[in-house]
Image: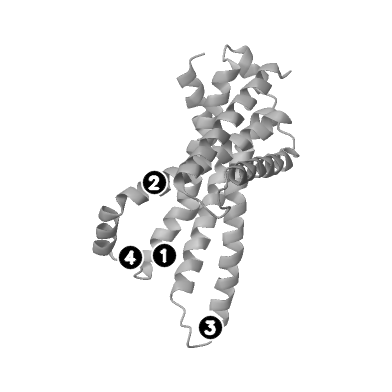
């Protein structure tokens, strides 16, 4: 089976997960509605009962969005273990290494889609509705700060990728069981402590978050988790 065809199968399967997309659009609507109401509140008068209700709804919606943006890729990572179809994919001629990278790619793609729907679109609409975006000023700042912007975006993407490789490795280690969430947090704590030791060994300030060290930290984490995930997957009895 060709690798591209397997990736298309993953995309097709995820696109037809209607429940997930319904949840995304519900959260998006609640975030937009609550954000627009809150952005137009006046600090010099008591909010009405409707505005208080919208504030509470916005708070719950934000917490729900954060939870969902973590739960959604986690669910995507473990679904083949739960449905017991991974062995069928391997038996069809797909190597375990190919499966690993196809799965990572599809999870990243749909996680990005979920972030855009649940977080990015509401933020843009709220800022536009409240007059919080000055197009000319934003263009000016972007033009002169493009280097810092691209650097920050690169670090954020690597941080996101390292999180997913840890998540995928956690799911693989316990074959998609519910405890993989605790394994993920355990791996996160261990890796954080290891890099803290590296910082102190070289006499670096703990609060020094220079881009070069963050780049090094994320790249090493991604490489280690990818290797660990592939090694475990190779020897795993499916």
The answer to whether any part of residue 101 appears in the image is: yes
Give the x, y percent position of residue 86.
Answer: 65, 22
CA separation, marks 2 and 3? 41 Å
Looking at the image, can residue 111 be seen?
Answer: no
| Sequence-first tag of 2 and 3 | 3
- Residue 238 locus on image (x, y percent): 72, 19
Q: Distance between the residues labelled 3 and 4?
A: 25 Å
Provide the secondary structure element on which disc 4 rests: loop
Is 64 rendered above or below residue 105? below
Say which residue appears at 72% left-offset and 39% top-offset. 183
- Looking at marks 3 and 4 on the same chain, the residue that comes earlier in the sequence is marked by 3
Give the left or right position of residue 141, taking residue 74 as reference.
left
- Marks 2/1 in contact by CB < 8 Å: the verdict is no
Residue identified by numbered label 1: 126
Residue 151 numbered tag: 2
Q: Mark 4 points at which residue?
A: 133
Determine which quarter of the picture holds residue 185.
top right
- Between 41 and 22, the one nearer to me in the picture: 41
**Which residue position is annotated with label 3?**
47
Residue 236 pos. (x, y %):
71, 19
Q: CB under 8 Å between callouts 4 and 1?
A: no
Circle 3 SS class: loop
Residues at discs 2 and 4 in contact (Cβ within 8 Å): no
Of all residues, the one furthest to the bottom in this rendering is 45
Q: In this view, does 163 lie above or below 91?
A: below
Dot placed on the residue nearer the N-terminal end, 4 or 1: 1
Dividing the picture into quarters, in which one does residue 50 lie? bottom right
Q: Which of pointers 2 and 4 lies earlier in the amino acid sequence? A: 4
Residue located 26% across and 64% down the image: 137
At x 52%, y 13%, the residue is 1
């Amino acid at each position: 089976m060709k690798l591209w065809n397997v990736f298309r199968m993953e995309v097709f399967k995820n696109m037809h997960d209607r429940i997930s997309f319904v949840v995304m659009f519900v959260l998006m609507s609640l975030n937009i509605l609550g954000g627009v109401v809150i952005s137009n509140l006046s600090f010099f008068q008591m909010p009405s009962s409707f505005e208080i209700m919208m504030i509470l709804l916005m708070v719950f919606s934000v917490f729900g969005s954060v939870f969902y943006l973590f739960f959604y890729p986690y669910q995507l990572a473990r679904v083949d273990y739960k449905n017991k179809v991974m062995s069928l994919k391997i038996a069809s001629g797909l190597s375990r290494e190919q499966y690993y990278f196809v799965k990572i790619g599809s999870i990243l793609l749909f996680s990005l889609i979920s972030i855009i729907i649940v977080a990015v679109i509401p933020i843009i609409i709220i800022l536009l509705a409240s007059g919080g975006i000055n197009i000319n000023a934003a263009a000016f700042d972007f033009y002169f700060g493009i280097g810092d912007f691209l650097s920050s975006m690169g670090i954020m993407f690597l941080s996101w990728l390292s999180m997913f490789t840890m998540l995928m490795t956690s799911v693989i280690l316990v074959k998609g069981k519910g405890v993989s969430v605790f394994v993920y947090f355990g791996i996160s704590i261990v890796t954080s402590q290891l890099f803290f030791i590296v910082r102190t060994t070289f006499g670096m300030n703990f609060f020094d978050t220079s881009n070069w060290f963050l780049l090094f930290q994320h790249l090493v984490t991604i490489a280690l988790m990818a290797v660990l995930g592939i090694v475990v997957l190779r020897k795993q009895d499916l």
